[in-house]
Amino acid sequence: MKRFNWIHKEISNLKASGFFTTIRTLSSPQGAWLEVDGKKVLNFCSNNYLGFANHPHLVEAAIKAIEDYGVGPAAVRTIAGTMDIHNQLEQRIAAFKKAEAAITFQSGFAANLATIQALVGKEDIIFSDELNHASIIDGCRLSGARIIRYNHCDANHLELAIKEHEGEYKRALIVTDGVFSMDGDIAPLDQLQEIAHAYDILLMVDDAHGEGVLGKGGRGIVDHFNLHGKVDIEVGTFSKAFGVIGGIVAGNAVVVDWLTQRGRPFLFSSAMTPPDVAACIAAIDLLEESTTFVDLLWENGGYFKNAMKASGFNIGHSETPITPIMLGEAPVAQAFSKALFENGIFATPIGYPTVPQGKARIRVMISAAHSKGDLDTGIAMFKKVGKELDII
């Protein structure tokens, strides 16, 4: 069919240039070790930071919720989809993060789309970090607001941009990732908050990779910088450190109230399922009881990163357990990933358009579920493949 010719051509070009993504299939629960394409492999690419995705406490809570509430809400929140368990989760996560209020969405992606569109429009300006996540970029585009990108994590450049465009907008929003997922660095939220306050601009941070990672007991980037009550909107996800699925917006109560009225995914898509909600509450239980999981995550991350640096790998400027192994071109990253898999290590390549061309990498996601033996096994295989491919 001729109408599909252009797609066939584009896919052929992706394959020829090394940018085509081959998707592997898991047949086991998430954990340090997985069954992938029929092979047992050591997992270095899931966002399961704390090992919660298959934790017995979460599994038990999800099963009980199915027995009590069924498998799905079958309605949007504003019609017949708000169950008491949804309210419990929002109250618990707000208290956990020391925020005035919180609202949940179907995913972190949906939370960003909902929030940005509800806060700014065609007469407004968004000041956005140039390396922000795709969900932020899409939310900005859908809002219709003018988008001004500032240099990555550069508060001085942000302030210059604000000064340059003063008087050109009705409302303005500063938006940034908290932890940048591809590089593992942390936004200078304390500096951004000072600027937002000085110019009376809304400040929004997407803490998807900071939830369960940064702050005391995983309370996130606002806690990390001790900015409680000073950051207007804190977006997060339950799909990474929490090991489940769903999105969260916490912060100023009036913003949360507004999202119940104008957050389109809240208004027009069914609520989180009861087992997911219950599992998220169970994750909060574990984090409130002890910092053990978060402490072990950071211990494992430091151990692996130090070994990679000592072996001669370029791991960029990561400040978190995220460990990018910088390889340059996409075909090199794909060859590296393939060789790792042949040696029992599951670590997927990441290239354009997820990261800029020439900055392809293997992004290693360390977990509290990894034992020291697991880490040593991974380190040995990375060194082996690195030498075989003349990377180190």
Image: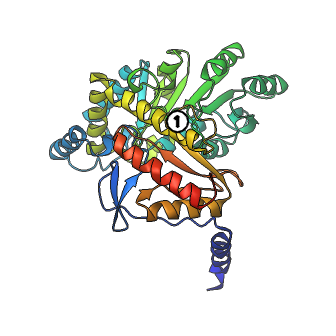
Quarter in which the N terminus is drawn: bottom right
Can you give x and y, in whole percent of width and height, for residue 139 in the image? Answer: 60, 43
Residue type at mark 1 is Asn
Q: Is 150 situated above or below 65?
A: above
Q: Which residue is mark 1?
A: 306
Q: Is residue 336 visible?
A: yes
Numbered disc total: 1
Q: Is residue 28 left or right of residue 16?
A: left
Mark 1 neighbour class, 10 Å CA radius: few under 14, some 14 to 19, many 20 or more: few
Can you give x and y, in whole percent of width and height, for residue 361 in the image? Answer: 60, 52
Q: Is residue 161 left or right of residue 191?
A: right
Q: Is 254 situated above or below 39?
A: above
Can you give x and y, in whole percent of width and height, for residue 195 in the image? Answer: 70, 18
Observer-nearest of 213 and 43: 43
Q: Residue furthest bottom?
A: 1
Secondary structure under tag 1 reads: helix
Which residue is painted at 21% across and 37% down in the image?
57
Q: Quadrant of residue 116?
A: top right
Observer-nearest of 340 and 113: 340
Observer-nearest of 294 and 7: 294
Q: Is 254 situated above or below 337?
A: above
Q: Quadrant of residue 372?
A: top left
Can you give x and y, in whole percent of width and height, for residue 48 in the image? Answer: 39, 43
Q: Is residue 243 visible?
A: no
Which residue is painted at 47% across and 21% down in the image?
253
Which residue is painted at 82% across and 22% down in the image?
163
Q: Is residue 390 left or right of residue 253?
A: right
Identify the image's colour scheme: rainbow, by chain, secondary structure or one colour.
rainbow
Q: Is residue 127 left or right of residue 179?
A: right
